[in-house]
Structures are given as C-alpha cells and as structure tokens.
Image (cartoon, helix red, strand yellow):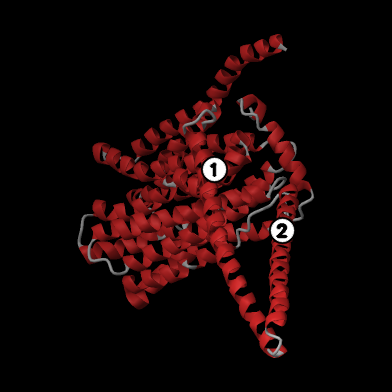
Amino acid sequence: MYASHEDIGYEFGDESKEREKKLRSDPDIDGGWAWMIVLSSFLVHVLIMGSQMALGILNMEWLEEFSQSRGLTAWVSSLSMGITLIVGPFIGLFINTCGCRKTAITGGILTALGWILSSYASNVHYLFITFGVTAGIGSGMVYLPAVVMVGEYFQKRRALAQGLSTTGTGFGTFLMTFLLKYLCMEFGWRNAMFIQGAICLNLCVCGALMRPIYYKEEATQNSGERNNCQSKSHAKALSCSAETLTSNGIFREDEKETNEGQSEVEKLGNLPALENKDVAGHGKNIYALCILKTVSQLMVTIQKGFGLWYSSYFGAASLFTNRRFAAFVFWALFAYSTFVIPFIHLPEIVKQYHLSAQNDIFPLTSMIAIVHIFGKVILGIISDSTCISAWNVFMIANFTLVACIFILPLMHTYAGLAVVCALIGFSSGYFSLMPVVTEDLVGIKHLANAYGIIICANGISALLGPPFAGWIYDLTQKYDFSFYICGLLYMMGILSLLIQPCIGKKKQTPEKSTENGKV
C-alpha cells in the first residue's frame, strides 16, 4: 500500500541516501535548531490559519458597515483563504530562487500591509484587493516555507514535527477569535484590523528563524571558496601595496637626486597622497567588480530557480508524469471542503434539530477544532513508528473521515453529533501527514513545488466547496444532500489513490523486464 520512490518511477533513491549521509552528522537534524523551526511554523499557523478561521467576526462587521449581500461579503474571507493556498505553485518559484527565509519575510510584510490597508476600506470591492489578494498572497508566501522547512530539518520524526507545527491552526482559531472579538468591541473593526496588521509583522520574525540548512559537504566547500577568495584578495592587496611602495621608492630616489635641498618631511608627506590616489582607484575598481559579480550571481540564481520550477511543472521531469502524485492532486481537489463544510453548516443543522441550548454550552465546531489538535499529534506519533507507514495511517484516516461525512446527516441527537464531530476532528488530523506523504512521493528536492500544487488544489476546494454545498441546499432545501454529494466526490479522490498505483505497477513491469533484457 505504501509507495516507495523506486515504484513511482522517480530516481530519488540515490538522492535520499546521499542526503541522509550528508545530514547524519548535522546536530540540527531531528534536534537543536530543528525545534526552533517547529516553533516558527507553529506561530505561522497561529497567525495565518488561526486568523482566517476567525474571519467570521469581521464578516459580521463588514455586513453591518457596507450593507452588501451575504454572498458578496463572504467572498472577502473566501478569497483570502483560497488565494493563500492557490498561489502555492508560484511561491515555489520564489523558494527555489530566494530561499525560504527571504520569501517568508517578504510575505510577512505583505500580509501586514494587506491588513493595515484594509482598515481604510470604503467598500467591499476595496477589501477584495487589499485583504483578499494582498494579504492572501502574503500569507501564502509565509505558509509554504513554514511547511517546507520542517520537512528539511526532520528525518526520523517528520510526522510528529509536522503535527506539532500544524496544531497552531487549532490554537490560533481560539486565540484569534477571542482577540478579534475583543479588539472589535473595544476599538472598532477598523482599528482592530490595523492592530492585527501590526501583530502580523511577527511573521517576519518567524521567517528570520527559518535558517537555511547547509549540508556538510556544501559547508566545507563554501568555506574553502571563501578562504580562497580571502587569500586571493589578500594577495592582490599585498601586490598592490608592493607596487605602490616600489613606485614610491623610485620616486624618493629620483627626488633625492634632483631635489637634494628638499626636506625629508616634505618627501614623506607626499607618499600618503600618492597612496590614497592609488587606493581610491583600486577601491573603485573593486566595488565595480563586486557589484557586477553580485548581479551575475543573482541572475544565475534566478535562472537556476526558474529552471527547476519550470522543469517541475512543464519540463521532462514534470511532477505530473508521476501518476501517484497526479492522483494525489486529484484527491486534494475534494479533501479540504469536507473539513470546511461542517464548520459552515453545523450551526444551521443544530438549529433545525432544536439543539441550540446544548450547542451553546459546548459548540460542536469547537469540539472538532479541539480534537483536531490531538489528532494531528497522535497521528504524527503513530506515523513515525517503524512498524506503521505514514501512507497507511493517511489512508485509514481518510476512510474514517469520509465515513463520518456520510453518517453525520443521520444523527439527530446532540450526543450522536458530538461523537461524529469528534471523529471528524481526529481523522482530519491527517493534514499534518500531507507534507510527509508528498515528500515520500517526489523527494525532498521537489517538495516545495509539489506541496505548492497540493495546497493549490486544497485552495480550490476551500474556495468552491462551501458555495457548492450552499447551492445544493438552495435546490433541495436540505443539508443532507450537501454532505452526501461532497462525500461521494471525496470518495472518488480516495479511490484514485488506491487504483492509480496498481495501474502504474502494471505499466512499469514490462519496462523493467525490457531493461533487464538489455542488461
């Protein structure tokens, strides 16, 4: 059931072995600075995903302020959540070119700018640009590096590390809901968004913590290159100073022969002036060469990053030639909506069943969020065990979630709904395994680009899933069919994960036999 790199057809076996050898002696792998990366990723989930889950409070303020339809106003928060995930493939280009740290810091500034500019909004369409697009793109530039860096720093405990970092979504939902409600009551929604923008500047600090990891061989090579450059520059400086002294020495001898009456003080006073002229000339040349070298290195870096990004999507090494990964993308198109839809429809379902009094004591949506936190950590610990693969845990959690989606409309009591919601929250903890499974499918080299595609598919699901469920309710006047249809679509995605590996193996067997024949 579990897919290895060799079965997939990507030659990542040698790459992963070399990477393990290089990282084996690094103290930051699975420890040390790696836990600071987990903390940074946790805070990113708190500030970004937590804030987006709490946008219902601001949505009520926008409805009252601008007096627009609920559908039009809801697109503000929907755009922000969707664009955060949809821009994933393009953020992979920035990561390949600039690295995770610079991308995340830039995204933090852009996110804060989007929140601050939104506080001056005069209509809903203004919010589409400032909050939906600007803050959404900025959030995507921070979110993807936060996930990728955890995968780079962990080998043995990747699933646990991803689970701990993504629990920030649950904690952030509670914290940001309380914070935004308090700020709106005390200062109004405009000042609340301004303050939240200032808080989002902490994303730059989180980005600064994402220190790039250097392999041992690369580190020694870079240090050797730096020492060579320093020795060359030092030798060049010595040669320049020797030439200067030689020319000055000759000048002094000539001056002695021609001007015997000139004092030694005057002759010595002329030396610094000549040296300053030579040094100034050499300094200008060095600065010009440094600028040209920096520009050329930048162009080479951009060219390499774009080449890797282009080949991952459109070239011969395209990720979509990996059939298991293509099936994984198809699954992701229906996965996220099954987690979002219960949050949207449960309050109305509780009202229809006359369970509002019990739901006010302990809301079902809060139950999903709390159990979701424990689900991520527990599933991560189970996946890191040697006897169970992350892929098997991932598939079992998917089957449990889709079964809960089908069962939920059949529950008409608070106790029954509470049990199903708890199972939904726990099984949806498989979101922490998605980066682990993605890395197993494509390798660490293509993780940024591959996971960018996955979260893009999730963004499409989050953007279109809830309106689709609402449209079904308008046609049928029941929420039951919304869960049934979304559950069927989700089951199609799960079946694609099961069927596609079998097709890939059948098609790979003759190729292997021919290769063996050639050898």
Instruction: Say which amino acid is labelled 2.
Output: Lys
Nearer to me, 448 or 167: 448
Is label 1 in a helix, a strand or a loop?
A: helix
Quarter of the picture holding the C terminus: top right
Instruction: Say which amino acid is labelled 1.
Output: Lys
Q: Image quarter for residue 392?
A: top right
Q: Residue furthest front?
A: 258
Q: CA distance from mark 1 to mark 2?
A: 27 Å
Residue ID for mark 2: 232
In the rendering, at what x and y percent does residue 104 appear? Answer: 51, 57
Q: Is residue 342 left or right of residue 213?
A: left
Q: Rate crowding at label 1 as few (under 14), some (14 to 19) or many (20 or more) other CA atoms within 10 Å.
A: some
In the rendering, at what x and y percent does residue 334 appear? Answer: 43, 37
Q: Is residue 209 visible?
A: yes
Q: Is residue 69 above or below residue 249?
A: above
User: How many marks can you see?
Assistant: 2
Looking at the image, do the residues carrying marks 1 and 2 touch, with CB atoms under 8 Å apart? no
Is label 2 in a helix, a strand or a loop?
A: helix
Nearer to me, 375 or 102: 102
Q: Image quarter for residue 110?
A: bottom left
Nearer to me, 270 or 3: 270
Nearer to me, 276 or 314: 276
Q: Residue furthest right?
A: 25
Question: Mark on residue 304?
Answer: 1
In the rendering, at what x and y percent does residue 420 appear? Answer: 50, 44
Mark before the other along the chain sequence, 1 or 2: 2
Q: Residue at x 42, y 65 (%)?
A: 112
Q: Rate crowding at label 2 as few (under 14), some (14 to 19) or many (20 or more) other CA atoms within 10 Å.
A: few
Q: Is residue 263 above or below residue 77?
A: below
Q: Is residue 210 left or right of residue 118?
A: right
Q: Residue at x 45, y 34 (%)?
A: 490
